Amino acid sequence: MSAIVHDGAAVLGRHLQRVKQAPAIVVMTQTMPIVFLLFFGYVFGSAMAMPGEEYRAFLVPGMLVATAGNGIMNGMFAAAQDSHRGVMDRFRTMPMSRTAVPLGQAAADLVTSAVGMVPLLLVGLAMGWRIEGSAWEAAGAFGLLLLFRFATTWVGILLGLASQSEEAAGQLGSATFMLPLLSNAYLPTDGLPGWLRTVAEWNPISAVTTAVRDLFGNAPVPADAAWPVAHPVAGALAWSLLLIAVCAPLAVRRYSKG
C-alpha cells in the first residue's frame, strides 16, 4: 500500500506538471463549460416554459455534472497519449506499482477538476443560481460531483489504454459530448417519448444531476421517474461506485499487460 501511495504521488506530480506546462489546454477546458452555461442559460432559457432565472437554477447543477462527465474524454485522451508515445512503456520498466500509474492520473484529474469547478460556480452565482440547501447538503453535492468525476476518469483511462491510436481516442472522446444531451442535465425528461425517457433516466448523468439539484435545493425529485432518478443520491453513489469497481481493476490490468 505504501508503494502505491508513494508511486501514485509521483505520477500525480507528473500529471500536474503537464497541466502547468500546457496552460492553453487548461484555459480551453475550463472556458468551454462556462460558454455552454451562458449559451444554454440565456438562449435556451428564453424558450423554456420555466422563467429564465428558474431555468438557470435548474441548469447550473446539470452543467456541473456534465463537466464531471468530461472525465471520460480527458482520461481517455491522456491515457492514449501516454500509451502511444511510449511513456507507459518507460513506466513499466521502472520498479513501481502497476496500480500507481493509472491511479496517479485519476488523482491528478480529480485535483484539476476540483479547482476547475470554481469559475463555473462563480459564473452560475452571477447568473442568479443559489445554493438553497444546508451547508452539509451542499458539501454532499460537491462530494458527489468529485466522486462521479473520479469514476468517469477511470472509464476514460480504460478506454484510452485500449485505444488503437491517439486519433481514435480523440474521436471517441469527442463523441461523449452526446451523453449529457441524453440525460436531464439540460432539459427535464418528463416531456420525452417513453423509450427515450427511459434511456435518459438510466443514464448515470441523470441520477447524479438529480442528486446534486436535490442537495443544492434547486429542484424537487421526480416521483414517477426510473429508480436511479427517483432515489438520486443512492442512484448516484451506486453508478459511481459501480463504474470505479469495474473500470479501475480493468484499467490496471490493461496497463500491466501493455
Image (cartoon, rainbow, N blue to C red):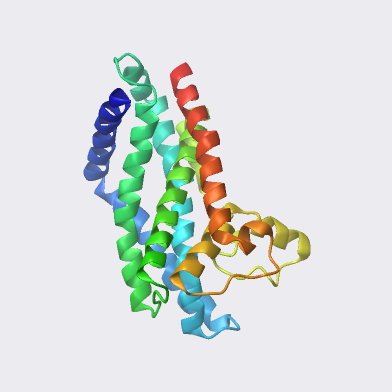
Question: Which residue is most to the right?
Answer: 194
Q: Is residue 102 visible?
A: yes
Quarter of the image for the N terminus: give it: top left
Q: Is residue 11 above or below residue 95?
A: below
Q: Is residue 84 above or below residue 54?
A: above
Quarter occupied by residue 3: top left
| Residue in the foreground of this view, choosing between 1 and 157 | 1
Residue at the image position 27 percent from the left and 43 percent from the top: 19
Residue at the image position 36 percent from the left and 17 percent from the top: 92
Quarter occupied by residue 188: bottom right
Residue 25: where, in percent of width, then height?
32, 49
Left or right of 221 on screen, residue 124: left
Q: Is residue 60 above or below residue 196?
A: below
Residue at the image position 55 percent from the left and 67 percent from the top: 186
Residue 202: where, in percent of width, then height?
65, 54
Count of numbered circles in the view:
0
Quarter occupied by residue 11: top left
Residue 187: where, in percent of width, then height?
59, 70
Residue 178: where, in percent of width, then height?
58, 54
Q: Is residue 153 above or below residue 192?
A: above
Q: Is residue 180 visible?
A: no
